[in-house]
């Protein structure tokens, strides 16, 4: 099963200013809930196409590692990061930035899938979907503070099911 998590924010800043916050790999640690114990372990991380970024975090007290590949990068319009190594069967996160009359519309759209068949679907239904929404809700609140001093408008994260899986760019090379 493929799921999509989506949320949006309109921040009263330019696209370039919004993109600048997201393109700093260290921002991710600032917008991740403390309960995950998230940290960037890549020395001197730089955001660019084909960059590889490594992270560590804790989920249910289990230490986990994650490697992200930046597969698309078009400043200040969008970038995509995909899990190269980590706990998901698929994780493809597209960040887009569009100008609006009020500033910049920032959209997060994550396509993801869990391993382990029916067990993964059960964990998603019972626990993970709500945890991911909570994580992205926290991100939205922190980004609202960082980008807009609390003046942004944002949507609550929503999770839906997809009919067919997207082909991860990381495997199209």
Image: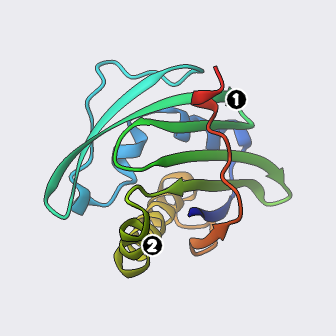
The residue at 48%/53% (across/down) is: 146
Quick check: can you spot residue 133?
Answer: yes
Between residues 35 and 86, which one lies in front from this camera angle?
86
85, 42: nearer the viewer = 85
In the visual, does 15 lie left or right of 156?
right
Does the residue at mark 2 contact the one at mark 1 (Cβ under 8 Å)?
A: no
Specify whether residue 71 is in view: no
Q: In which quarter of the image is residue 25?
A: top left
Residue 36's spot in the image, x, y percent?
Answer: 25, 57
Q: Which residue does the numbered mark 1 point to in the structure image?
A: 75
Element marked by disc 1: loop
Which residue lies at the image location 50% right of the left edge and 56% below the top edge? Answer: 113
Question: At x 39% / y 76%, what residue is drawn?
Answer: 122
Q: Toward which corner of the image does residue 67 lie, by quadrant?
A: top left
Q: Quadrant of the N terminus?
A: bottom right
The quadrant of the image that shows the C terminus is: top right
């Amino acid at each position: 099963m493929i799921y999509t998590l989506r949320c949006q924010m309109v921040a009263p800043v330019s696209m370039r200013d919004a993109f600048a916050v997201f393109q700093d790999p260290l921002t991710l640690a600032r917008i991740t809930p403390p309960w995950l114990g998230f940290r960037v372990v890549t020395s001197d991380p730089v955001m660019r196409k084909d960059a590889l970024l490594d992270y560590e975090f804790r989920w249910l007290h289990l230490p986990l590692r994650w490697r992200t590949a930046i597969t698309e990068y078009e400043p200040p319009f969008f970038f995509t990061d995909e899990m190269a190594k980590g706990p998901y069967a698929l994780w493809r996160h597209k960040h887009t930035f569009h100008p609006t009359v009020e500033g910049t519309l920032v959209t997060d759209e994550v396509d993801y899938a869990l391993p382990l068949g029916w067990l993964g679907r059960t964990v998603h239904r019972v626990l993970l979907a709500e945890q991911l929404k909570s994580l992205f809700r926290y991100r939205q609140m922190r980004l609202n503070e960082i980008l807009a001093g609390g003046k942004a408008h944002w949507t609550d994260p929503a999770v839906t099911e997809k009919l067919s899986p997207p082909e991860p760019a990381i495997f199209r090379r």
